[in-house]
Image (cartoon, rainbow, N blue to C red):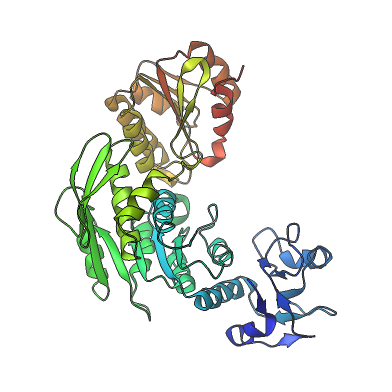
């Protein structure tokens, strides 16, 4: 990136103070800012980046976008620096003019984002969401990491309240979009599944640009979403019926997909559980509509790397296998991950942590997961949770609760044998990566 500060005057509705300057990057972190970067101090609930402007300047910042006035450094004064960050990202993506894909949903956003980007990278240089930067601050920062060579952006769009997705779409202006699914999550902030549903549906709004909408014909909300997308071009996927992109046949290691513009594509897969198939179908459709061909699809899926903590199978203690799914957890993703666990050869155990942000219904959802684990065939369950009594009561025999990670590790480790597949899953606040590290191969 190389822009003049004066290029931002029109979009920010304010003039450069002191003098114009050329900057070569944007940062909101005074600690990591580099020479000749533009510093944008952001206000949060518990911090104000304006307090660190001097640090940013000392560390190399050459200009500011700020809500306050400063001497001896070029700056543009604005009313809201967070909004300014989004406006700058919109302007910068317009300079590059890539094909932009927007992905939202409760489960699978990061997997589909990574897979779609992996496929598209074989077609054209592609930018994808940086780490988990998928909110009003993170998404613009992801866009601003782009180089002019990037002719496709694949952007994950998250939400914690109504209006969030609408705002992200206005910043990114994607021409290809999808809702992967909607299920209970973040109920502490959303209050109800209906609120989650209406928030995710903001991606379908009829704004001042056209969109291709990828929808799953097998989803219970398909008809509702198709109606809300009637101003856009609808592209369908299905694992069960004929669609624009659909599964012709599947086995444990091969998926045959029919597409509108290509012959059948034979895709190698690790398993044939429903969420894996859906993630692949969404990724194939999104990438294809952005220009990828069959060879790109096969290469991209074959070379996609596992995302740490989402379903990474690693060598465990005493010859066992650990399934690291500690990145996050909600009821739907928990059940899907249990399905994947049951596809593996070996004895399945589950180390279950708490799922956060489920509000007043939290205990009911934890009981549901315990029931699902028991009915799926999980042999032993180990849990740390404020709902532990209810979970153990639902699962029955061979279930155990603990107060701390250390207690669980000390109890479980001596009983691990080489025939075990141990799924370790919880929301991030549980810090279950500590358990993964302690039970990994070579840890004594």
- 169 is higher (above) or lower (below) than 363: below
Give whichever of 75, 296 is nearer the camera.
296
Q: Give me the residue at 28% from left, 52% from top.
A: 281
Q: Quadrant of the C terminus?
A: top right
Query: Where in the figure is residue 363, as x and y percent of width and height?
Result: 40, 36
Q: Is residue 424 left or right of residue 81?
A: left
Residue 126 coordinates in the image, percent (x, y): 47, 61
* Frontmost residue, 275 versus 267: 267
Give the residue at the far left of this rendering: 242
State left or right for residue 73 relative to residue 91: right
Residue at the front extreme of this rendering = 295
Horizontally, is 405 left or right of 56 in the view?
left
- Residue 70's spot in the image, x, y percent? 81, 78
Residue nearest the viewer, comparing 242 with 351? 242
Q: Quadrant of residue 9?
A: bottom right
So how many labels did they put on this image? 0
Using the rendered image of the protein, determine whether residue 42 is visible from the camera's viewpoint.
Answer: no
- Residue placed most toward the observer, 418 or 405: 418
Residue 25 image-quadrant placement: bottom right
Q: Quadrant of the N terminus?
A: bottom right
Residue at 31% over, 65% down? 289
Check the image and report above or below for 174 versus 130. Answer: below
Q: Quadrant of residue 56?
A: bottom right
Q: Position of residue 332 (x, y in %)?
A: 35, 42
Please report the residue visible at 77 percent of the width from the left and 69 percent of the height from the top: 61
Q: Is residue 9 left or right of residue 435?
A: right
Q: Evaluate whether residue 293 shows in this view.
A: yes
């Amino acid at each position: 990136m190389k822009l003049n500060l004066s290029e931002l005057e029109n979009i920010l509705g304010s003039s450069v103070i002191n003098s114009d300057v050329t900057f070569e990057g944007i940062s909101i972190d005074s600690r990591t800012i580099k020479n000749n970067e533009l510093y944008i101090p952001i206000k949060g609930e518990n911090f104000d980046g304006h307090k660190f402007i001097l640090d940013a300047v000392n560390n190399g910042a050459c200009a500011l976008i700020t809500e306050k006035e400063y001497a001896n450094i070029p700056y543009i004064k604005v009313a809201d620096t967070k909004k300014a960050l989004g406006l700058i990202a919109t302007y910068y993506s317009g300079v590059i003019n890539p094909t932009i894909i927007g992905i939202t949903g409760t489960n699978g956003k990061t997997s589909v984002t990574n897979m779609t980007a992996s496929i598209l990278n074989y077609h054209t240089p592609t930018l994808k969401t940086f780490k988990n930067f998928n909110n009003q601050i993170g998404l613009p920062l992801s866009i601003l990491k782009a180089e002019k060579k990037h002719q496709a952006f694949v952007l994950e769009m998250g939400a914690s309240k109504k209006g969030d997705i609408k705002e992200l779409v206005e910043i990114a202006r994607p021409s290809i979009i999808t809702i992967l699914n909607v299920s209970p999550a973040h109920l502490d902030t959303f209050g109800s599944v209906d609120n989650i549903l209406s928030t995710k549906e903001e991606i379908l709004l009829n704004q001042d640009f056209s969109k291709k909408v990828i929808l799953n014909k097998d989803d219970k909300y398909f008809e509702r979403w198709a109606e809300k997308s009637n101003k856009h071009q609808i592209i369908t996927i299905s694992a069960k019926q004929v669609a624009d992109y659909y599964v012709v046949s599947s086995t444990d290691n091969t998926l045959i997909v029919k597409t509108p513009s290509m012959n059948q594509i034979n895709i190698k897969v690790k398993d044939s559980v429903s969420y894996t198939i859906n993630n692949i179908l969404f990724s194939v459709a999104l990438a294809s509509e952005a220009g990828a061909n069959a060879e790109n699809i096969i290469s991209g899926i074959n070379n996609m790397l596992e995302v740490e903590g989402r379903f990474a199978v690693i060598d465990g203690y005493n010859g066992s296998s650990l399934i690291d799914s500690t990145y996050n957890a909600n009821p739907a993703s928990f059940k899907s991950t249990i399905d994947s666990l049951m596809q593996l050869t070996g004895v399945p155990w589950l180390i279950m942590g708490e799922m956060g942000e489920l509000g007043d219904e939290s205990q009911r959802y934890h009981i549901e997961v315990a029931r699902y684990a028991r009915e799926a065939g999980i042999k032993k369950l180990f849990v740390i949770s404020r709902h532990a009594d209810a979970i153990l009561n639902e699962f029955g025999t061979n279930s155990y609760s603990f107060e701390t990670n250390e207690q669980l590790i000390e109890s479980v480790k001596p009983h691990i044998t080489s025939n075990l597949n141990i799924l370790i899953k919880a929301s991030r606040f549980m810090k279950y990566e500590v358990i993964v590290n302690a039970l990994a191969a070579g840890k004594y």
